[in-house]
Image: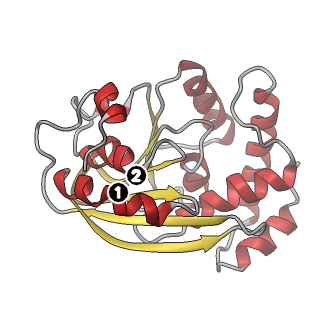
Amino acid sequence: MIDKARLEQKCSTWNIALTGAQLDQLDQFAQLLVEYNQKVNLTAITDPEGIEDKHFLDSLLFASQPEVAGRMVDVGAGAGFPGIVTKIYKPELALTLMEPTGKRVEFLKYACARLGLAGVEFAKERAEEAARKVWREQFDLASARAVAALPVLAEYCLPLVRVGGSFLAMKGAGGEAELVAARGAIRKLGGEYVETRSLSLPGGDARTLILCKKISQTPPAYPRNGGKIAKSPLK
C-alpha cells in the first residue's frame, strides 16, 4: 500500500528511525484505513503518498517529541491520528483513544486489534464530559489534531492532564495566531505556555506544535458544557 522506503527516507530528514516491524505495521494500518473507509467516512486522504505525508509523517513528527511518554489521551481520535501512529512508534506508551462517534470507535478497536497493539483504552466520550468524570487530571499528556481552535481545544484537553503533565496541540500554519487568542484560556485552565515548534511536511504544509505545561489544578468550573465552549471560548 504505502512505499515503505519512501516513508523511511522522509522520516530520516527529522531523525525519526522506524524498524522494519513498525514500517510493516504502518503499511497494514494504511490498508485497514482505506478498506474501512469504503463503509465509514474516516478520511478524505486515501492515496498512498497522501497517507504517508499528511497522516503518518504528521503523526510521527508529534510522536517523536520528548513530552510524548507515560499515559497519553488522544482527544477526538477520529481515524487514529496521531494516537495509533504514536503507539506504533512508542509501543511502551499507555494510550487512551477518546472519540465520541461510535462508528469511529469501532474502527479504532478493529485497527488496534488487527495491528496487535496492547495497552490501549477506548473512551466513547466527549472530552468536556470525560473531564468531569473519572478521566479528570489522569493523563501525563493530552493532544488533539484538527479538532477545534486552540482556546476551545485547551478547554477540552487541559482538564484531562495531571499537574506536571503536558498539553501538546497539533496545529497548521495558523497556530501562532491561535496561540495569541488562547493565552488567557490556558492560564485559566491551570496551564502555562512553554514553546512553539514549527515544522513542515514534504509538500510544504506548515505544522505547528504548541506545548503547554499543567502547573496547577483546573478550577472546578471547567470544562463547561460543549455548547458554551464553542460559542464563548475562554479569553
Identify residue type, mark 1. Answer: Ala
Q: Is residue 225 left or right of residue 59?
A: left
Q: Is residue 47 above or below residue 64?
A: above
Q: Residues within 10 Å of mark 2 (few under 14, many from 20)?
A: many
Residue 59 visible? The answer is yes
Q: Nearer the viewer, residue 148 or 43?
A: 148
Gap in Å between the C-alphas at discs 2 and 1?
8 Å
Q: Is residue 56 above or below residue 225?
A: below
Do callouts 2 and 1 mark residues in contact (Cβ within 8 Å)? Answer: yes
Q: Nearer the viewer, residue 177 or 96?
A: 177
Q: Secondary structure at mark 1?
A: helix
Picture residue at 72% right of the left edge, 78% below the top: 12
Measured from the top left, where is residue 87 in percent x and y? 55, 52
Q: Nearer the viewer, residue 74 or 91?
A: 74
Q: Is residue 206 left or right of residue 119?
A: right
Which one is earlier in the sequence, the residue at label 2 or at label 1?
Answer: 2
Measured from the top left, where is residue 152 in percent x and y? 36, 43
Residue highlighted by disc 1:
181
Measured from the top left, where is residue 128 in percent x and y? 31, 32
Picture residue at 61% right of the left edge, 57% below the top: 59
Residue highlighted by disc 2:
150
Label disc, if present, on residue 42 of the rendered structure: none
